[in-house]
């Protein structure tokens, strides 16, 4: 073993979590080293070639508002960009982009390389130096000792990874990368409970052998919506590539059924817990036997490649079966497989061992982010990476951890769910997990979080000043709309009736008029001649905030009640089993998870409202 | 520290057979809530703010009106007490009702519809403590009160599973989830073609839910169980004459009576009135080891009925020795402290034997039930009617002495359920408003989540967990 120069922070893993963690740490002035088993795997997208989508798009915008990189990087490298759910309410509008995978990772690596204070190092971290429960450094498999004050584990699906399809089984990380085999046993040795999860990916096929004319074309939006609040639609405009929709046939189902005995899922070879929302095609056919056909989406992997991702055909069936079943899809009769789909099993940890700052409770200075915490998805990983990076820095500086609550952000919901409730399968973000989703919209992520990003130090003054301007413009315009009254003149009523809405009998404010579904800001232009010239983003925000005012207010009131409980902190040294009146099950759960607040405690399964009442009384008794 | 944001209400006196009861309302709006249902003596209408304008610690005579239709529910005395000089430290109103238990619960219902919510177990005491009205040294007893009353609430919640209102609520809850899952799957998986999503007529479904919730709310008579009174369960081995006794009480052949052991495979419930005391009589399947699955179920229900009752009549034929099964039942009753009577049946068949006296001693020594007279064993012949008067008068005196009381749990559980239905109804109605204003299905989903949560159990999964489980079990999704 030899000794390297000391670093402040070591990030173990160069995936989406590792990149955000390392960038946040370095940008906050920490001397940072990022390790990856292979530098070509930095920001790799080993599964679908897209970023965002329902609820995930929200995460990306939140990451951007806090000063993270994912939004900027996808804006540089997208192949197609689309706002989903626009026919539904504003809470669930969701941005999704197809990514050029190759350019995505190249751009991200370049950003890392140009960040001062950040070293990228190809090496497998094999050991952690922990003295008296405090992290002192990390040690690579080749024997280099890197002293550091804090580390973020972002090992993705690499720990003791095994790739499986059919009868073939290989000790390997994703996409042919080497696995990382040494760290698991060290973590177990430190008393961290590990578990095994499973996920999978479909085959990649050759564009030359696909007949797109038999499929439905799917185009992006024009103009596009940038993920990053620092970009404009014109600024990132570029020609977009289409995706295609096709279907399975009866023959697909027949082939899969005939070969189920060769599936490692059903033969018992695969033991890990897989995600329900990402089932393999064989799983779908077994579980939804009466469904006659399944949608399959073909998505380009990049601009300069013929590889297409076959979304909906994730599989660990043998290679020959995969080829045969892919050739039963409409328009894919002659398709050639370039990469075989596979299942991958990997080690991760039980996230209930973390606190809300993503710190592993047992070891001071050690943080974890991404799939190692039982999550799934690039965006979920990036969000955790950013938070873990920020909190590792704050730990070193002796500052309070930075925690987002369930009413602040999807990021808060994500981390609270993982840490408080735990998960038995890879965890995916969904809009229905967010109880305050009308407040946590993707359009207002900047309004919710830029201030915090600025306080942390990841939002520079220029961007912050522009943000304050936007915020002031929204407030001023809302105020003007509430103040400005319109009388029911013949001219006004003519416009209202033309828009298909009732004429005015008495005067009404512009704000009230705009609550009518037919009356957008634009429609009202002729009867509102004195309006200021505003940025379209400001107008959109004003429209949403005004139209949903009543419901936003109700949800804000609920958040107030929620905050009261979140702000009732529980001391770290609570002796739960000794509290009279607490049921045994509740005391055990509370002692294991050690919630930070009464609010968090109330979300632990097995803790009843009566237990919470007992805790409140106990707190009062001991505070006097 | 101010914990008085939400106004809570509950019946503050034990629910017995007496007609007098007190409803306590506590919190910021306690007096305003009371004003909404109170019509002072000599006035035409409720809701004029007389109580709010009055001095603290004053009593007001008047009537409580149903806010829905102005119907007079009861003549009452209202005590107005303003914080902090009250039990909870908050503004408090207490309504003294006279019209009996049925009226009492209707008055509570009126209060709950006028802006209060049902108090949680031990919540008045908890608030008193948190608002500094109780000594710090009392904290532990406060915790005991909370955990004890929550046990009671849990038992009540368990009890409701077998109730009719309970099963209707479960049914509606499932329907809300069925609808919610279709709304939400379309939001989280917009690019998927899902038949249920395409076929969904959201407006019709919401209207139907409102109709059914409203019907349930209006017909769910939370007083029903209580008007039917004290729950008396008839238990014992097969062929001990349980059904014969039930029929003797009721004076009709309600239960099938044969001498084949195990005839009553299910529990039967009947109401009767014992000198003005409402009694709910429950006949159970005979308890014995059996391999017949149908009979096993009956035995399980019989055991449940025993634990749900306020008084247990343990029947043993006068001409038979006690068996280990009898011993087991009696000793578990004695351990639990649940009031019971040992009834020796079929005395018409038994000789007047010395064996009986010996048995009697054993029973007396085994008895540990508190508050009950020690000579509990009663001898009857339901067939000839001999001893029936003695049994009835024993039950009557147990009730009047307070040794046997109706369990508040059933009552509480039902009032809570009715309030839950009300909240769910309001949420779904809001969903219709949102739909008519075309504000977006996401917000309708939020209202359905609220409705589902309102109908939920005290414990159990949150709506998010149930929803996500249901989404992935019903729909084929994912890359």
Image (cartoon, grey):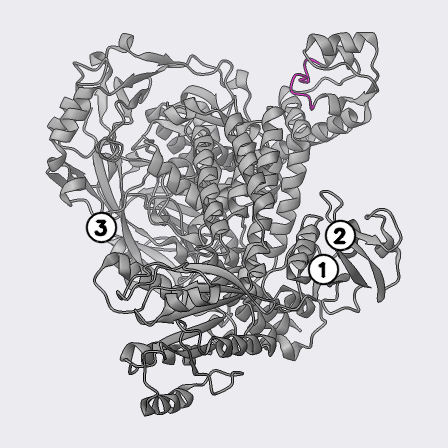
Quarter holding the N terminus of chain A? bottom left
Magenta region, residue range: A515-523
Hey, which residue is sitting farthest front in the picture? B384
Percent of width and height locating residue A151: 40, 53
Q: Secondary structure at mark 3?
A: loop
Q: Quadrant of residue B29?
A: bottom right
| Circles 2 and 1 in contact, beta carbons < 8 Å | yes
Quarter holding the C terminus of chain A? bottom right
Q: Which residue is mark 1?
A: B25
Q: Secondary structure at mark 1?
A: strand
In this rendering, position of residue B362 left or right of residue B206: left
Q: Out of A389 and B209, give the one closest to the viewer.
A: B209
Q: Residues within 10 Å of mark 1 (few under 14, many from 20)?
A: many
Q: Magenta region's main secondary structure?
A: loop
| Circles 3 and 1 in contact, beta carbons < 8 Å | no
Q: Is residue A410 above or below residue B19?
A: above
Q: Is residue A49 above or below residue B471?
A: above
Q: Out of B205 and A585, give the one closest to the viewer.
A: B205
Sequence-wise, which precedes: disc 2 or disc 1? 1
Q: Which residue is mark 3?
A: A181
Q: Which residue is mark 2?
A: B33
């Amino acid at each position: 073993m030899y000794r390297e120069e000391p670093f402040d922070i070591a990030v173990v893993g160069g995936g989406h979590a590792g990149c955000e963690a390392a960038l946040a740490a370095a940008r906050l002035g920490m001397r940072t080293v990022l390790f990856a088993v292979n530098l070509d795997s930095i920001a790799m997208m080993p599964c679908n070639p897209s970023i965002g989508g329902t609820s995930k798009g929200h995460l990306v915008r939140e990451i951007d508002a806090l000063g993270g990189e994912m939004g900027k990087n996808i804006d540089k490298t997208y192949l197609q960009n689309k706002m989903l759910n626009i026919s539904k309410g504003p809470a669930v509008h969701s941005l999704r982009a197809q990514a050029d995978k190759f350019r995505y990772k190249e751009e991200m690596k370049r950003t890392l390389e140009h960040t001062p204070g950040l070293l990228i190092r190809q090496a497998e971290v094999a050991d952690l130096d922990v003295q008296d429960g405090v992290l002192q450094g990390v040690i690579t498999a080749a024997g280099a000792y890197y002293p550091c004050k804090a580390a973020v584990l972002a090992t993705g699906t690499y720990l003791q990874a095994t790739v499986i399809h059919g009868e073939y089984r290989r000790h390997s990380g994703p996409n042919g990368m080497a696995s990382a085999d040494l760290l698991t046993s060290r973590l177990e040795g430190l008393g961290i409970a590990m578990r095994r999860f499973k996920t999978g990916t479909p085959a990649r096929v050759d564009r030359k052998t696909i007949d797109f004319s038999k499929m439905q074309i799917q185009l992006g939006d024009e103009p596009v919506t940038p993920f990053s609040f620092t970009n404009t639609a014109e600024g990132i405009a570029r020609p977009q590539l289409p995706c295609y929709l096709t279907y399975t046939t009866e023959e697909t189902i027949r082939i899969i059924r005939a070969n189920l005995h060769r599936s490692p899922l059903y033969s018992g070879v695969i033991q890990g817990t897989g995600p329900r929302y990402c089932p393999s095609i064989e799983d779908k056919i077994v579980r939804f036997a009466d469904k006659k056909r399944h949608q399959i989406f073909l998505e380009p992997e990049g601009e300069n490649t013929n590889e297409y991702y076959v979304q909906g055909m994730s599989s660990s069936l043998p290679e020959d079966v995969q080829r045969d079943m892919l050739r039963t899809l409409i328009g894919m009769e002659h398709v050639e497989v370039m990469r075989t789909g596979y299942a991958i099993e990997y080690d991760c940890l039980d996230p209930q061992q973390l606190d809300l700052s993503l710190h592993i409770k047992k070891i001071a200075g050690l943080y974890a982010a991404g799939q190692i915490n039982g999550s799934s998805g690039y965006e979920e990983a990036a969000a955790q990476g950013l938070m873990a990076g920020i909190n590792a820095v704050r730990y070193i500086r002796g500052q309070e951890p930075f925690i987002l609550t369930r009413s602040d952000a999807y990021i808060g919901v994500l981390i609270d769910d993982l840490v408080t409730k735990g998960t038995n399968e890879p965890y995916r973000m969904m809009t229905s997990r967010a109880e305050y989703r009308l407040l946590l919209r993707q359009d207002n992520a900047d309004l919710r979080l830029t201030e915090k990003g600025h306080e942390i130090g990841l939002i520079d003054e220029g961007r912050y000043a522009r943000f304050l301007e936007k915020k002031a413009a929204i407030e001023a315009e809302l105020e003007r709309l509430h103040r400005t009254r319109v009388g029911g003149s013949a001219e006004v009523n003519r416009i209202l009736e033309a828009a298909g809405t009732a004429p005015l009998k008495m005067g009404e404010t512009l704000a009230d008029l705009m609550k009518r579904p037919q009356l957008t800001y634009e429609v009202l232009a002729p009867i509102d001649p004195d309006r200021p010239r505003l940025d379209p983003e400001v107008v959109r925000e004003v429209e949403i905030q005004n139209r949903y005012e009543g419901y936003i207010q109700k949800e804000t009131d609920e958040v107030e009640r929620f905050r009261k409980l979140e702000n009732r902190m529980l001391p770290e040294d609570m002796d739960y089993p000794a509290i009279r009146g607490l049921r045994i099950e509740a005391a055990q759960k509370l002692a294991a998870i050690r919630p930070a607040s009464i609010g968090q405690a109330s979300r632990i399964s097995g803790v009843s409202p009566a237990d919470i009442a007992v805790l409140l009384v106990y707190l009062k008794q001991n505070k006097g | 520290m101010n914990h008085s944001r939400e106004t809570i209400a509950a019946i503050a006196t034990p629910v017995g057979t007496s007609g007098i009861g007190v409803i306590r309302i506590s919190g910021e709006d306690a007096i305003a809530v009371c004003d909404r249902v109170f019509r002072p003596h000599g006035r035409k209408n409720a809701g004029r703010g007389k109580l709010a304008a009055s001095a603290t610690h004053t009593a007001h005579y008047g009537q409580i009106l149903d806010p829905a239709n102005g119907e007079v529910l009861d003549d009452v005395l209202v005590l107005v007490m303003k914080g902090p000089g009250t039990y909870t430290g908050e503004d408090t109103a207490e309504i003294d009702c006279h019209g009996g238990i049925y009226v009492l619960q209707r008055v509570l219902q009126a209060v709950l519809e006028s802006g209060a919510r049902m108090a949680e177990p031990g919540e008045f005491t908890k608030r008193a403590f948190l608002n500094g009205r109780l000594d710090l040294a009392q904290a532990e007893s406060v915790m005991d009160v909370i955990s004890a009353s929550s046990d009671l609430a849990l038992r009540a919640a368990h009890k409701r599973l077998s109730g009719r209102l309970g099963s209707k609520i479960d049914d509606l809850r499932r329907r809300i989830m069925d609808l919610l899952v279709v709304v939400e799957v379309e939001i989280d998986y917009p690019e998927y073609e899902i038949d249920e999503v395409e076929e969904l007529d959201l407006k019709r479904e919401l209207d139907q839910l409102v109709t059914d919730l409203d019907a349930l709310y209006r017909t769910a008579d939370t007083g029903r169980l209580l008007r039917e009174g004290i729950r008396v369960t008839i238990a014992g081995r097969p062929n001990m004459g349980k059904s014969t006794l039930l029929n003797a009480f009721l004076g009709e052949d309600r239960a099938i009576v044969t001498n084949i052991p195990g005839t009553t495979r299910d529990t039967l419930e009947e109401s009767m009135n014992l000198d003005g005391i409402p009694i709910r009589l429950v006949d159970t399947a005979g308890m014995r080891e059996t391999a017949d699955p149908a009979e096993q179920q009956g035995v399980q229900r019989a055991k449940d009925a025993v634990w749900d009752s306020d008084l247990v009549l343990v029947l043993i034929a006068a001409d038979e020795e006690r068996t280990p099964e009898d011993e087991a039942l009696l000793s578990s009753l004695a351990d639990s402290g649940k009031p019971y009577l040992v009834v020796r049946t079929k005395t018409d068949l038994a000789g007047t034997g010395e064996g009986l006296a010996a048995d009697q001693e054993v029973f007396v020594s085994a008895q540990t039930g508190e508050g009950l007279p020690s000579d509990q064993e009663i001898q009857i012949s339901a067939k000839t009617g001999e001893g029936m008067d003695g049994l009835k008068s024993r039950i009557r005196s147990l009730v009047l002495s307070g040794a046997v009381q109706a369990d508040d749990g059933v009552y509480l559980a039902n009032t809570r359920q009715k309030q839950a239905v009300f909240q769910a109804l309001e949420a779904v109605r809001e969903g219709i408003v949102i739909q008519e204003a075309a504000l977006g299905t996401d917000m309708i989903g939020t209202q359905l989540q609220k409705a589902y949560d309102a109908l939920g159990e005290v414990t159990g999964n949150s709506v998010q967990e149930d929803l996500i489980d249901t989404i992935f079990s019903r729909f084929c999704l994912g890359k």
